[in-house]
Image (cartoon, rainbow, N blue to C red):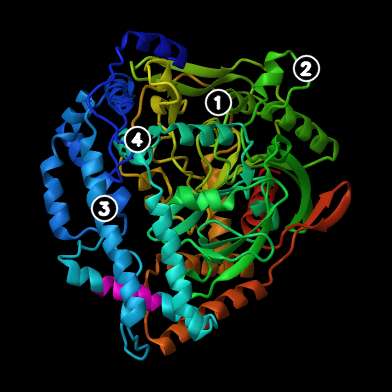
Amino acid sequence: MNSKKLILSLLFFAASISVFAYDRDSTELVPKPQFAAEAKLTAQILDTYHFSKINLNDSLSSVILDSYIETLDNNKSYFIQSDIDSFEKYRYVIDDKTKEGNVEIAYAIYKVFNQRFNERMAYVDNSLENEDFDFTIDEYYETDRSKKPWAKDEAELNELWRKVIKSQKLNLTLNGKDPKEINKTIKTRYDRFKKAISQYNSEDVFELYMNTIAEAFDPHSNYFSPKTSDRFQQNISLSLEGIGARLQTDNDFTKVVEVLPGGPAKKSDLIHANDRIVGVGQGEDGEIVDVIGWRIDDVVELIKGPKGTTVRLEILPAQTGVYGSSEIITLVREKIKLEDMEAKAEVIPTTRNGKTYKIGVVTLPSFYMDFEAYQKGDPNYNSTTRDVKRLVNELKEKDIDGLLIDLRNNGGGSLAEAIDLTGLFIKDGPVVQVRSSSNKVEVGSDEDTELVYDGPMAVLINRFSASASEIFAGAIQDYHRGVVMGETTFGKGTVQSVIDLGRYITVPEGEKVGQLKLTLQKFYRVTGSSTQHLGVSPDVNFPSAFPAEEFGESSKPGALPWDQIKGTKYSPTNQVSPKLLSELNKDYNKRLTTDPVLIDLVEEIGELKANIAKTRISLNEEKRKLEIEEAEKRKADRLKLTGTKIQGEGDDKPEDIKSDDKYLEEGVVILAEMISAIG
């Protein structure tokens, strides 16, 4: 069912408003009146239209309770076991209460959290005033408590927080902070934290709770409050001004998940995926505000700002992990413009077996289309397919020997563009199958018989290639049209639509209601295999620091499963044979043990994986110093690494491409090997 039909079918819902009073003068948060109608409507939509066809029942209620508790206290730092025990009475009633429009459970649990939070802040104040820490004792602090048991009582929680404060004081000491200022710095940090939590309002609690309910169906279904809806629309229209990075909470840290093409973060090359942001400062010399333990929304509010303004970030680089020292980087905010997201091309020569091959590389950050210009009949509207077609024709004029499409970090975009782009490289035929919640299957096909390029081809993917990228890479692989290499992709094979709940609920003047993003469809390859969960596996696997169980769709507990439907008829080419893939993998595996660049890459990735996994840090000053020194030495050694540089060609003038892009280097080499093998 498309979104338009869905909207029409929702008109029969009666949006009753009742149940709760809202005391604006009370310091205790209670639901607003319209939340009852929103909860009932959201539950009804999820039950009726979500792709999974599962119901909001006792089983899902249990999942929701655990998830909501985790949302409030993801690192088990506030609640104690008796609190968790007291919440058990809610385990199998959330479904019924939500359908009735009763969301009191959200506020009852939040009230306990708020009480525990205030107790922890009081403990911090007392500890800073009275505790004398001994940094010669050999003890450790575990930064990730997500898999640990809840503290059994307040005394155990005090011991945990003693180590938290001790670790922070030790960090500041080793960073050269004046001893007289250390307590003041930590107190200021937690005062700001208290202020941020004190600003939570009724709408914030409702959003946390309803989003937890939606995500129980699958991780891409979400509830957006009116404020979050505005931010979502800004992201969709690329009008949000900031640094161009996608962030998420990782225990007490804010972690960089993805650096977006065209943004200041990407252009600066100063911040990367898996770096942790621990502080934010405004302007060239504004005070760095510590954001450890902050809500992700509050961190984002500090980082974003008007175009042209400066923001400074204190980060823990992924290369050194929690053991390393922090760094401060400076970025100038700007808008991510459409043209910054456009496809770009270059020619990279490489020599294999005594012969030089000219490899055309098209880098594609997203699958974009200017719908507004298209609807207005503008013949020059921007689109992925039009731009790539032009670039490929320009590359052909430079007599390229092969073409590499770089889809790394491409999170997707327009499905139509993924289909049309595939059509540039196959004669015609089906590209993707889309199944609705009613099990109706529609086939998206390329009906244009024109081939823009029929020469040797490869596609480069990584863990953060998703959605439309997976459709394109999967089709090229299924048609045996090109070699797919890199890392297994993200595994997002679902389609969502956004429903404005305000169209069906009448609210008091001046009030607004939110939106529901709902999973309605699922993608399948022409073979019938879903791209969901498993993603696209490359023909040639590169070493990866990002395991699926931590960074892909598989890392999300509520992710819809992989499945398979009947394949559709298609006519694969014979351009990539099993024998060719066997030869390429044989050569690649040999180079893994003999090529200095690949050997360094494997070692670097191994260290990165180890640093990401480290969560236990010493509270002994001498040991911590040694950990920092070793981490910094490893980082320095990495920066000194040298390898074979590939010469790039832009405007017919050779120039060095990024020497640290070893994945691109290897992609070029493998494509050259392929060209050599097929003669």
**Residue projecting furthest to the right:** 652
608 relative to 190 in the view: left or right: right
| Amino acid type, label 4 | Trp
Of circles 2 and 3, the one toward us is: 3
Cα–Cα span, label 4 and label 1: 20 Å
What's the distance in space between the residues labelled 2 and 1, CA to CA?
20 Å
Label 2 SS: loop
Kindly identify which residue carries mark 1.
Answer: 415
- The amino acid type found where label 2 is placed reads Pro
- Answer with mark 2 or mark 1, whichever residue precedes in sequence: 2
* Earlier residue among tags 2 and 3: 3
Crowding around mark 1 (Cα neighbors within 10 Å: few <14, some 14 to 19, many 20+) is some
Q: CA distance from mark 4 to mark 2?
A: 40 Å
The outermost residue toward the front is: 25
CB atoms of marks 4 and 2 within 8 Å? no
Q: Earlier in the sequence, mark 4 or mark 3?
A: 3
Tell me which amino acid carries mark 1: Leu
- Residue at which label 4 appears: 562
Q: Is residue 414 magenta?
A: no
Magenta-drawn segment: 159-167
Residue kind at label 3, given as amino acid type = Phe
Which label was assigned to residue 113?
A: 3
Location of the C terminus (image quadrant): top right
Q: Residue at x 29, y 32 (%)?
A: 22
Callout 1: SS? helix
Q: Position of residue 388 (x, y in %)?
A: 72, 32
Is label 4 or label 3 in front?
Answer: 3
